[in-house]
Image (cartoon, coloured by chain):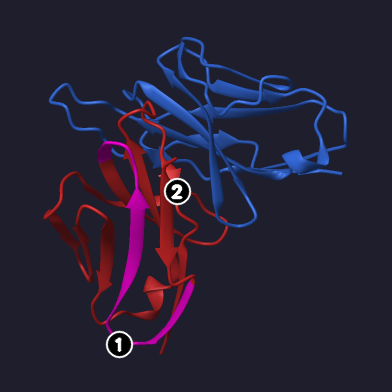
Chain colours: A red, B blue
């Protein structure tokens, strides 16, 4: 059975304090790994798609990386507006195109 | 449109009543997905469509849930005889598969919060 586990569940950072969020997965035939950001009361907002081990993508203060077993979302010098829940999801080879989500990491960045 | 639209934002039903939720995908996207989010962050896939055809319904409770995507109409998710455990936020997402073999991201709507009393 496909599994997606995110850690930590919650993370509190000072503004400017860099850190990483982890997403470990077991899936039969990975099609893609997706990172989303979700603000309270809103739908998930797409950040990145990673398709193969070794791939990296960057956007502003965020950088996503992928290995055969896990993905990291690195946040460099975060700002309070980066506070949100970050969701990782995998798309497996036998799942149609449905996304299997982890439970997310709730990030709070304080000034 | 440029965003996935979902209506209504909030829906309150008494147990046993019917609930119907609507989703307008991004123009030009041929795939529509429905997810249920309970307990804050637990997403459950329900059903997906390719245009008006059911693509994957492996997550769909068979007994009380049904969904449609008809041409020139918003997609809909209907729950007959709602139960307390149906209380959740229901998200719709749309996607456009590329023939090059990459599987495009799914863009989510703002969700419909269903409360069953």
Task: Name the residue carrying label 2.
Answer: A101
On screen, residue B31 versus residue B42, left or right, reads left
Residue A86 visible in the snapshot: no
Q: Quadrant of residue A88?
A: bottom left
Secondary structure of the residue carrying numbered label 2:
strand
Q: Position of residue B78 (x, y in %)?
A: 68, 23
Task: Name the residue carrying label 1.
Answer: A17
Instruction: Compare marks 1 and 2 and give the one earlier in the sequence.
Output: 1
Q: Residue at x 46, y 9 (%)?
A: B71
Q: Chain of mark 2?
A: A
The residue closer to the viewer here, B1 or B103, is B103
Q: Position of residue B84 (x, y in %)?
A: 82, 42
Residue A67 visible in the snapshot: yes
On screen, B68 above or below B31?
A: above
Q: Which SS type dominates the magenta stretch?
A: strand
Magenta extent: A10-31
Q: Residue at x 67, y 20 (%)?
A: B62
Secondary structure of the residue carrying numbered label 1:
loop
Q: Position of residue B115 (x, y in %)?
A: 77, 44
């Amino acid at each position: 059975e496909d599994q997606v586990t995110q850690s930590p569940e919650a993370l509190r950072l000072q503004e400017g304090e860099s850190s990483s969020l982890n997403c470990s997965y077991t899936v039969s035939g990975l099609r893609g790994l997706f990172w989303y950001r979700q603000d309270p009361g809103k739908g998930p907002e797409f950040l990145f798609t990673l398709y193969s081990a070794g791939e990296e993508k960057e956007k502003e203060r965020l950088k996503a990386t992928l290995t055969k077993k896990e993905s990291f979302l690195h946040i460099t010098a975060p700002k309070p507006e980066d506070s949100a829940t970050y969701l990782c999801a995998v798309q497996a080879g036998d799942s149609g195109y449905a996304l299997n989500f982890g439970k997310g990491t709730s990030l709070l960045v304080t000034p | 449109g440029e965003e996935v639209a979902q209506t209504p934002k909030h829906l309150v039903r008494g147990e046993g009543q019917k609930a119907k939720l609507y989703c307008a995908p991004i123009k030009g996207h041929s795939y529509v997905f429905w997810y249920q989010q309970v307990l804050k962050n637990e997403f459950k896939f329900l059903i997906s469509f390719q245009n008006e055809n059911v693509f994957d319904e492996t997550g769909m409770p068979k007994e009380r849930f049904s969904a449609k995507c008809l041409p020139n109409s918003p997609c809909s998710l209907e729950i007959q005889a709602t139960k307390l455990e149906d209380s959740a936020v229901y998200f719709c997402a749309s996607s456009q598969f590329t023939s090059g073999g990459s599987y495009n991201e799914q863009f989510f709507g703002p969700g419909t919060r269903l409360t069953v009393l």
